[in-house]
Image (cartoon, helix red, strand yellow):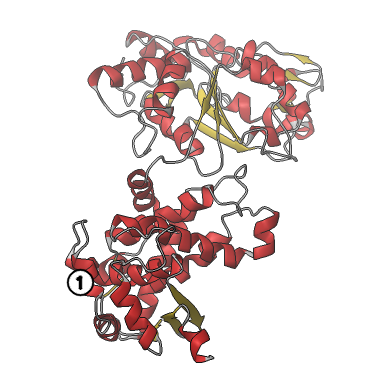
Amino acid sequence: MKLNHTKIKTLGDLKKAGYQSQGIKDELRGNLRSKLAKGEETFEGVWGYEGTVIPELERAILSRHNINLLGLRGQAKTRLARLMIHLLDEWIPVVEGSEINDDPLQPMSRYAIELIKEKGDKTPISWLHKTDRFFEKLATPDVTVADLIGDVDPIKAANLKLSYADDRVIHFGMIPRAHRCIFVINELPDLQARIQVSLFNILQEGDIQIRGFKLRLPLDLQFIFTANPEDYTNRGSIVTPLKDRIGSQILTHYPDDIATARKITEQESQLDERQTDAVYVPDVAKDLLEQISFEARNSEYVDAKSGVSARLSITAFENLLSAAEHRSLRNGGDGTAVRLSDFMGVVPAITGKIELVYEGEQEGAGSVAEILIEDAVKTIFPLYFPKIDKLEKKDAETPYDDLLHWFFNAEGFDILDNDTDKEYKEKLDSIPHLNSLLNSSESDIIPADSYFLKELLLWGLVAHKKLSKHRFNQGYQFKDLYGSFISGL
């Protein structure tokens, strides 16, 4: 029921308007039913979960369940929880001055009960907006029962001259103050077991225990928990009786394909308009960037149990544009396009986002990042160029023979980090056979992407051990794989 909250100021006004109380789980369920019936999107801006996580979450809400979102880092668990506020009513009435959002028709606290008893229908009413009905707590080892549930406040007792036996000396914690709201506890396994035990009664019976007070407060909350899989989280676990009281446990996952990953990265990247206006990013570069995360999730050097967050691609994309922008500014500030050599600028974003196993530690984080970029190039390469067969015969002809022969006779080919766009293009155009290989591609190639693809071709031949690549302070040098040994260099 929609009420004109600006005109309803007292309990009497609320009764005349025909307001009826309902629990938050019924409220969420009702609004979700309405959205589903109208074909409206329920969790906007979350990609890749349309056929998996979101239907399960919708079913959990329809079932009025408390929910645990279980998944690796960077899988939009907290975002899903925050989006649930859009399933709440726009405004709800509360007893004015109540610490715990008392429903005027179903008062619960001593303050609200006594106020309504004293003033009756003249009891003042205030309105709470749905954006103020979301509480979030990160579970850390220092969280106490007092923080979540409440404790005796000696200052309040002294100021009001009350005995510690009087329930008015209670200072309510975050959970009672979130009455009629969504309450999220992030990283639940990090919460100490004894603190998790304090949630038992709230989840099942809706009451709380504070010190020696006997309180029967039928708290009305929608709990959302987030957690990493227990086999990964070494810091703790969810105690079994608490898991038993959580209605639905929903497993989240990483994007299944490059297209979905790109949507997430483009939506979440924090970019300056001057950056996006000045830097052109070829589609193949965007695909290559996302492929790095996919390679990391399957790499023997990266701890799969830790996961590879979607934030890797997001921060890497920001770094990629900054690398191109940096070069452009050094060369006079004209517009530029992303180059494959700019991908060395994303190494710091990769090294901070992956957990390495022993073999990875031996290689070093920087080296592993470069290996992941090379693996991504190797995966993307056959989408644009003829596949290179590892088992090809020694003297068999390949489409790359003329190009490799050119490198065999050349002393080397250098691409510098700060080459102007004109110098960069002239250098790539100076290599015969690149254009013919590009023209033979079966993929539709946008002219603006052609130079990136030419560089991809060189990197791909390096990844397939057909050319060598050497990094020096100012850029890269590509050479024939065996020419340097033959010449004695």
Horizontal side, residue 181 vs residue 382: left or right: right
Out of 441 and 56, give the one closest to the viewer: 441
Horizontal side, residue 387 vs residue 11: left or right: left
Q: Secondary structure at mark 1?
A: helix
Q: Is residue 25 visible?
A: yes
Q: Which amino acid, mark 1? A: Ser
Q: Is residue 322 visible?
A: no
Where residue 199 appears, as percent x and y from the top left, is 68, 21
Q: Compared with residue 163, is residue 105 higher up or lower down, i.e. above or below? A: above
Horizontal side, residue 418 vs residue 70: left or right: left
Where residue 229 appears, as percent x and y from the top left, is 62, 33
Out of 365 and 484, give the one closest to the viewer: 484
Where residue 59 appears, as percent x and y from the top left, is 42, 17
Q: Compared with residue 266, is residue 373 higher up or lower down, i.e. above or below? A: below
Residue bearing the label numbered 1: 436
- Mark 1, Cα crowd under 10 Å, few <14 / some 14-19 / many 20+, is few
